[in-house]
Amino acid sequence: MRIVQSLLHKFNWKYYAVTILLLGVALSPVRAQQEGRDPAEPLQGKAQPTTLPRPAGAVARQDVDEKAMAALVHELVGCGTRLSISSWTDPKRGIGCARDHVVARFNEIAKESGDKLRVIVDKYEAESERTNGPAAMENVYAILPGSDPKLEKTLFIVSGHMDSLSSRWTDPVPDAPGADDDASGTAVSVESARLLSKIAAGGKSPFRATILFAAVSGEEQGLLGSRHLLDWTKEQGYTVGGMLDNDIVGADLAPGGPHRVRVFSGNGEIDDCDSSSRELARAIEEIDGREAIRMVFRVDRYGRGGDHYYFYKAGLPAVRFTEPLEDYTHQHQTPRTENGVEYGDLEKYLSFAFMGNVARDNAEALRQLAMAPAPPANVHLRGAVSPDAKISWSAEEDPERAGFEILWRETTEARWQVYDFVPSSGETILKGVSTDNHFYGVRSVGKNGARSIAVPTEPAQRTTPSVIKK
Ligand SMILES: [Zn+2]
């Protein structure tokens, strides 16, 4: 004891008291648990729901015909220019030459599919400040009809634009090879048609909804072809279930590839509720995997536009696929060399390994979406000022549907988690789950494991917040 006392005399007591106090606070297990932890939701003990496996028979990467894609791109580049206001009748040079090649390829594929694929050339007139007055335009569609009478009027679209642009936007004289922008997207659309019509060829097609493979014109003249396609779907009585725009999907020039393809989706305009386009992007990422898809939560590349735009603005699910890192010396440039820099959208910069990945990812996303039941409707969240979240939705009768997945995520999370599985529509109560801290959604699940896109909850009635009880 005497020894201890003599030792203590040697210490500076004030200094050690403070140090010991601070150490105690930092190491205290009680404090560590309290700091940074929020109340648990759902209440502890909630079992993880069992989820159905996704549909078997995924499109295999080795089934993608890169050579056929390269051949089509080569033919399109060989048309010299594909400016939408170049010649529609010259078989050797101009946009008409491109149409001919796309139609010929679609016809070959249709033949291989036992004529399940229907090829249409849709002629129309359009005008913008880049058309020198009203201009004749044509889109090419290949349609794979859905096999389910209830879903055949639901349409999933994959689209590329077959037109191209030189440095002179209204001049058909200069060459505009457009290998990447957008012979690549056209090749992805056409190859998707081949991959999926092959699946549909024997017996009853597994695709319940209809799939349309498009090669539009007029993109560079102001999204004229896709705008016309949107009108066409309405005239034909289709509901657009999803629109996959592929534009500049042919190159992966940055070192360290292969990289992920970017998938752009807009926010939408409703408070606390993402757009259906965002839900389509999430569905694509979930189907193809995070290693294949880089979601970008933005309607398009900054300050730029594409063929999904008018679909998105119409409230329809529409996204844009674009390569990882664009090279602007290749886009919309008349081929030339200036100060040692080579300009021009040339085939030599393309990567068919990358483009093949994009084709596979488009085809697989379309395959699963076209096999899925319709998304639920009237998806509402109630339960403000109450301890439980109440989610309700409706859905038409569908004997092929297994049920519904209730989805949730932290408001700061990018991706859904499955909270629960419910066999029939109506209302489900999430006990002890606050309406405030998460976003919620519902999606339909087929007996085949295919999921619809998610439908995020909206309030049952839009009310001014001040009117809601405080
Ligand atoms: Zn483009």
Image (cartoon, rainbow, N blue to C red):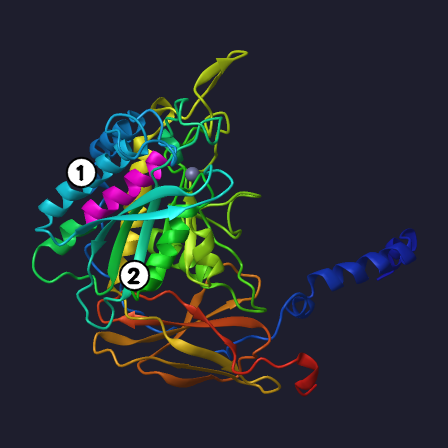
SS state under label 1: helix
Q: Give the range drawn in magenta.
A: 182-195
Give the residue displayed 43% in from the left and 79% down from the top: 378
Q: Quadrant of the N terminus?
A: bottom right
Give the residue displayed 48% in from the left and 43% down from the top: 128
Give the residue displayed 62% in from the left and 86% down from the top: 385
Badge 2 amino acid: Leu
Question: From what the image shows, is residue 407 above or below residue 251?
Answer: below
Query: Which residue is more in the foreground, 409 or 296?
Result: 296
Image check: 311 left or right of 144?
Answer: right
- Residue 155, numbered circle: 2
Query: Which residue is more in the foreground, 172 or 295?
Result: 172
SS state under label 2: strand
Res 359 seen here = yes
Image check: 198 left or right of 329?
Answer: left
Say if mark 2 contacts mark 1, CB within 8 Å.
no
Give the residue displayed 20% in from the left and 61% down from the top: 207
Q: How far apart are marks 2 and 1 (CA)?
A: 23 Å
- Chief SS of the magenta region: helix
Quarter where residue 447 is shown: bottom left
